[in-house]
Image (cartoon, helix red, strand yellow):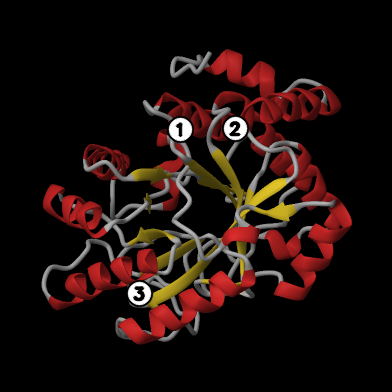
Amino acid sequence: MTRHDFILAEIDSIYSQPFLDLVLRAQLIHREHHPPNEIQGSVLLNIKSGGCPEDCAYCPQSAHYKTGVARTDLVSLDETLTAARAARAQGATRFCMGAAWRDVPRGPQFDRVLEMVRGVRSLGMEACCTLGMLDEDQAEALADAGLTAYNHNLDTSPEFYGEIITTRTYGDRLATLARVRDAGIAVCCGGIIGMGETRDARLRLLQQLASLDPHPESVPINLLVAVEGTPLADRPPEDPIELVRMIATARILMPRSFVRLSAGRLSLSDEAQALCFMAGANSVFLGDRLLTTPNPTADVDRSLFERLGVTLQGRAGLHGPPIHE
C-alpha cells in the first residue's frame, strides 16, 4: 500500500537496516512498479544564470557569494529548442529548464518560458521547469502551456533548513508545491545530502517527501557538489553508501515515484552508480553539465549503461507522442 503517514522510527528502521537487506528490499519493490532495467533520461538547461537573491549555502548562482558564475539574461526560444533537440537525440525523454530566480517574473520573460514549454512539448518530449516560487496564476499558465512537471526541492529537513537557507521559508516551498499540484502539474521534489546534516535530518526530509499526497512523481536525490566561494565549499565528500541508503529508502517509501540520481554523479565510481540503480534509482540527468556543475559526458554514460545492460526509457520511440509518468 502507498502510505503518507510514516513515523520517524519506521523510516529509521528502514534506512538503518543491514545494507544488503535494504538494497534487496528496495530492488524487489522497484520491480513491482517499474521496468527493472530501464532509466529515464533527462537533460537540464540553464536558461538564466546567476544573480539569484536567495542565499542557499550550496548554490554557486547565489548573488551572495563570489563563485565566478556569470549573470546571464534569459536565453532565446531558438537556443532552448536547439538544446532540446540535441537532448532528444542523446536519448532524453524529459527536457528541464532552470532559471536562477527567487520568484517567477511576470511579463515578457514568463511569456517566453511558456513558449519554451510549448516548443519542447511539440518535440514529443516531457517539459519540466524549475524557476523558483510560483503563484496560482503562473502555475495554471504553465499547466495550460503543457508543462509536464515542476521541480521545487525541499533540500533538507525543516529543522536543518535554516542552517542552509534564510531567504525563503520551508512553508514557502510547501506552498509552491501545493500550487503546482493544484494546477495539475506533476511534482518533482527531492533534496541534497552531504551539507553537514545529521542522519535524523535525512530521515525527516524523507518523511516530508513521503507525506506529500500524492507522492512526488519525481524525487531527485542530490549529492552536494562543493563549489569554491559558497559556505559549503569545504565540506568533505559524502560516503556513497549513505547515498545508496537514501535512494533505497526513498524507493521503499515512495514506490511509484521516479527516483533520480542527480547532482554529484561525476564524483561517483561506476560501482557506486550501479549500487544506486540496484537500490531503485531509475532516472538520471544526461549531458555534461547540470546548471553550473559538471556531469558525466554522453560517452561515459553510454559505456556505463551498456555494461550494466540498462536502456533509456522510450529510446526506441523518441519521435512519438510524449511519455507521461
In this picture, residue 195 sits left or right of residue 181: right
Q: Position of residue 256 (x, y in %)?
A: 54, 31
Pointers 3 and 1 in contact (C-beta within 8 Å): no
Q: Where is residue 254 in the image (x, y as percent from the top left)?
A: 54, 28
Residue 41 appears in the picture as rendered: yes
Residue 75 appears in the picture as rendered: no
Judging by the rendered image, the residue that carries numbered circle 3 is: 63
Q: Position of residue 249 (x, y in %)?
A: 64, 29
Front position in the image: 195 or 221: 221
Q: How far apart are marks 2 and 1 (CA)?
A: 9 Å
Q: Distance between the residues labelled 3 and 1?
A: 28 Å
Which of the two marks, 3 or 1, is nearer to us in this view? 1
Q: Which residue is drawn at 79% across and 70% down?
A: 300
Query: How many other residues sit within 10 Å of disc 2, few (<14), some (14-19) or many (≥20)?
Result: many
Judging by the rendered image, the residue that carries numbered circle 2 is: 250
Quadrant position of residue 11:
top right
Q: What residue type is labelled 1?
A: Leu
Front position in the image: 238 or 306: 306
Q: Distance between the residues labelled 2 and 3?
A: 32 Å
In this picture, residue 112 sits left or right of residue 59: left
Quadrant position of residue 129:
bottom left
Pointers 2 and 1 in contact (C-beta within 8 Å): yes
Q: Residue at x 53, y 13 (%)?
A: 1
Q: Which mark is residue 209?
A: 1
Q: Which residue is drawn at 32% across and 56% down?
A: 147
| First in residue order: circle 2 vs circle 1 | 1
**Secondary element at tag 1:** helix
Q: What residue type is labelled 2?
A: Ala
Which of the two marks, 2 or 3, is nearer to us in this view? 2
Q: What residue type is labelled 3?
A: Ala
**Secondary element at tag 2:** helix
